[in-house]
Amino acid sequence: MNRWLLPVALLGATAAAGAAARAGPAQDYALHCMGCHGASAQGVPGKVPPLAHSLVRFMNNAEGRRYVLRVPGAANSMLSDAQLAAVLNWVVAQFDADELGSATPQFREQEVAANRHTPMAGVLATRAAVLKEIAAIGPAPATEY
Amino acid sequence: MRSFQAWAALLAMMASGWAAASDPLPPEQFGMEPLPARTPHWIYVVDSAFMNETDSRVRLYDADTHGHLGQIDAGFFPGVTLSPDRNTMAVGTTYFARGGHGDRIDVVEFTDMTTLALTGEIVLPAKRAQATPTYFNLGYSSDSHFLYAAYITPAASFGVLDPAARKVLGEIDTAGCVLVIPWGPDHVSSICDSGRLLTVTLDAQGNEVSRALSDTFFDVETDPLFVQGIPTNQGYTFLSFLGKVHEVDFSGTEPVFHLPWSLLSAAETGHWRPGGQQLGAIQRRLGRLYVTMHRGGEGTHKKGGTEIWVFDLGTHRRIARWPVAALKLGPVSALQVSQDESPLLFLASDNPAAVATVDALTGQLRHTDTNLGQTPWQILNP
Amino acid sequence: MQRLDRIVESSARSLAQRTSRRSFIGVLGRILTGSLLIPLLPIDRIQRAEAATGPEGSPAKGKSAGKPYTEDQQNCEYWKYCAIDGFLCSCCGGSSHSCPPGTQQSVVSWIGTCHNPADGRDYIVSYNDCCGKASCGNCDCYRNERERPLYRLSRNNDVNWCMANTGSDYHCTVSVILGSSGP
């Protein structure tokens, strides 16, 4: 029997209904992200960017959202488009809840599908450019990590 | 030398006073043995020395004389490559300031392959991919102008080095694609999880001019590609977990992917697999592919082979199967073949550790050496 | 895994203060201490079919069979070592899930799944390395279930998982259960 309890507050209703017979975003985070990004999404200084207090700041900006979906670890992961949307939404709910505004749109499956397969030329250069854009209008993730 | 001569004179004086049936041995010169001229039957065996991994080595071996010729120290998780003229070996490695701990120093060290003398080094940022040895951990451009070093931090990128000036020129972010497959004077390809090759083109200063992604040519979900490519006249041939052969032509302006063909019949697929570290070799003159094969399923792709299968690259037909046990060898995890007219096939096992020299035409065992490393995972034939 | 536990614990605690106990926020810490059951893992059909035939392509052993899935945590065939390529920390002064004294836990790892035939469940395990000392050299295992080449770094054993530690010399590997699924 499935004893995994779905949180009422889980963002992204798409995950809830179908998730009874399949793994959900917490487990997907463990299997596909946590190995490098860490149990608290804290990253590794100088080597792996944090997601905590960071991912949410990409979400209010169109280029920021595109960047997140094209990052190799996300884009090339074994997750389906729906699963990738769900795990990203889960990460911000867990680790950036204090910054998550009600106006911040969740990631949707269609958005993932439309963006993840556009490869990035260079991750760090793209990230730096996106951060500049974000910083112009609001709090930006740290450039250095 | 003066002290030796003095001793020699003293001993000669003492000897002259003795009644001896024959003349005593003459005194010797203490010098350094020169490295003989290279032959096609030399191999350089990369020993990752996994049980003592900060002490990996490259051992030089003459398969005709069974002679051990010398050694190059290779540090921790080395990547080894030869310059296009074969006269320089570059070893990308890591040293810790206190042996197994202490400050990490990543470095490329250069050895003159006519003398085995260290001739210089380039200190790298501490980003080098510390991985098992393949042709693609470190590589020269075709004109020797650049040397590329794969980085994994875990982010993937590669360093562009100037081997002549002994310096780091820069770093190219590969967006998750790994390793460095240099081709031509200014192209470097990397292998991507998406099943594509990324190719970056550089200018004369080593800066990126452009990049391109190929179409997908393998599917990591259904039949992953082994990264250990095998050199051919046109580029590299890659094998897949389920025994497909992917010949990639790098002789033009972009990589060209030949239609894959299978090493296996339908009945054999999924049951026999290639496996090991350096799991194939190609004799380019004969057009023969040698692959180390074993029976097994999921999870056995690094298992050494119990048979060497030999294929004709023109017809794609298997022309021989040589049982490894008949060679008194453990499972074979690395193989290499010489490119001359009397080719030798070299088979390495790490369990127990040994390198066998075999006639590449007949499969007959010539010789086995058990002192070429504890985990000989890559064999280079210069 | 002390450092990981501390991070998870403090994170879980602070998050639990803001959210329902039944939410996944508070649950994350318990996942990582292995006390919570999570549902069947998304292993694709091909891999599950192959897993059923066992690592050597032979028929899988049932619950009652003793080998090769022994209960000996110093044996390479122990079920949760299904993708350990390296030395077992349990033979080096650590345990199956903790580092030997004086070594450092790797800050990155790869996270895979192993099947426990004793209870029929699949478990998520974290393959962390213990770093900063020379090769342990004991119990050298070479298993690679569901391991994939270097371009799929999150499933790869060819690279040194001590790579991101200040002292990146590799000593041994652990397998830490993160969670399991129901029967």
Image (cartoon, rainbow, N blue to C red):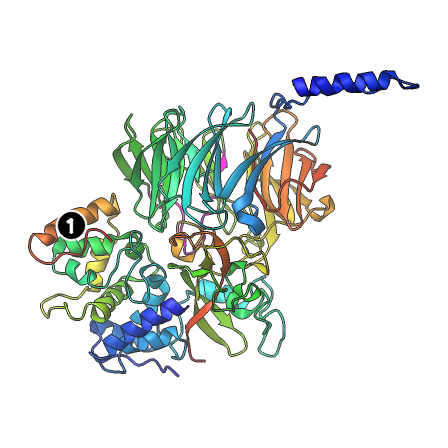
Residue at 45%, 46% (x, y): give it. Answer: B96
Residue A34 located left or right of residue A54: right
For residue B138, say whether it is visible: yes
The count of marks equals 1
Other residues around mark 1 within 10 Å, as few (<14) / some (14–19) / many (≥20): many
In front of the other: B113 or B200: B113
In front of the other: B338 or B252: B338
Inspect the magenta stretch and tell me whether residue B228 lies in it: yes
- Where in the figure is residue B296, as x and y percent of width and height? 58, 57
- Where in the figure is residue B358, as x and y percent of width and height? 68, 36
What amino acid is labelled 1 in the image?
Val
Reply above or below: A60 against B237. Answer: below
Residue at 35%, 62% (x, y): give it. Answer: A32
Residue occupied by mark 1: A130
- Where in the figure is residue C117, as x and y percent of width and height? 54, 75
Quadrant where the C terminus of chain C is found in the figure: bottom left
Magenta region, residue range: B215-231
Secondary structure beneath dot 1 equals helix
Q: Most prominent secondary structure in the magenta stretch?
A: loop
Residue at 22%, 59% (x, y): give it. Answer: A112
Residue B107 is drawn in which quadrant?
Answer: top left
Reply above or below: C166 against A53. Answer: above
Quadrant where the N terminus of chain C is found in the figure: bottom left
For residue B265, say whether it is visible: no
- Where in the figure is residue B283, as x and y percent of width and height? 57, 32
Reply above or below: B193 against A13. Answer: above
Residue A2 located left or right of residue C15: right
